[in-house]
Amino acid sequence: MNELDLTIRLREDTAAPEHEFRLVARDGQVAGGCTLPDPVAALAAVERFGKDIFFPQPGPPKLCTQQYGGPQVAVVSGSINGRPVNVTFRRTDGCEIARWRAMAPLFGGTHGSRGET
């Protein structure tokens, strides 16, 4: 990824304060302005899973287990290589929990980012 600038807003539940983090990268390297505790791991998660999660292609419907993973909500906005990103993550079913786990380093390592209840 040549250029990445993402803002991550996380709430562990509706009554909890919002955590905000930023991930900035240039030419595949973490750049100044990052506020994540582990920006290298967050960048690795984005490089590995970001294309499929932030820019999904149409495909067959998915069957998702009906399980509740917790009240956490994360909103990721910004841009990757000039393409706008605005994606919400929740832990409302098995598919959403899998997306959350794939991108967990991007959520700052807070109690709720790890999916703990």
Image (tube, grey):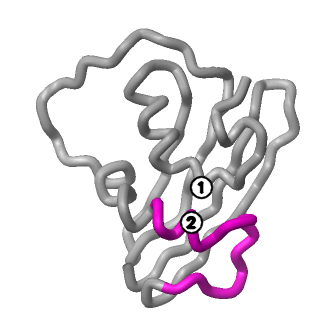
For residue 71, side relative to residue 111 (left or right): left
Residue where numbered disc 1 is placed: 105
Observer-nearest of 91 and 77 = 91
> The magenta stretch spans which residues?
29-45
Q: Secondary structure at mark 2?
A: helix
**Which disc is residue 41 wearing?**
2
Q: Earlier in the sequence, mark 1 or mark 2?
A: 2
Magenta segment includes 36: yes
Quadrant of the image for the C terminus?
A: top right
Quadrant of the image for the N terminus?
A: bottom left
Residue 104 placement (x, y as % from top left): 57, 48
Question: What residue sits 38% from the left and 77% below the top?
Answer: 81
Q: Amino acid at mark 1?
A: Pro
Question: What residue sits 43% from the left and 39% below the top?
Answer: 99
For residue 36, side relative to residue 43 (left or right): right
Label 2 Cα neighbours within 10 Å, binned few <14 / some 14-19 / many ≥20: some
* Total marks in image: 2
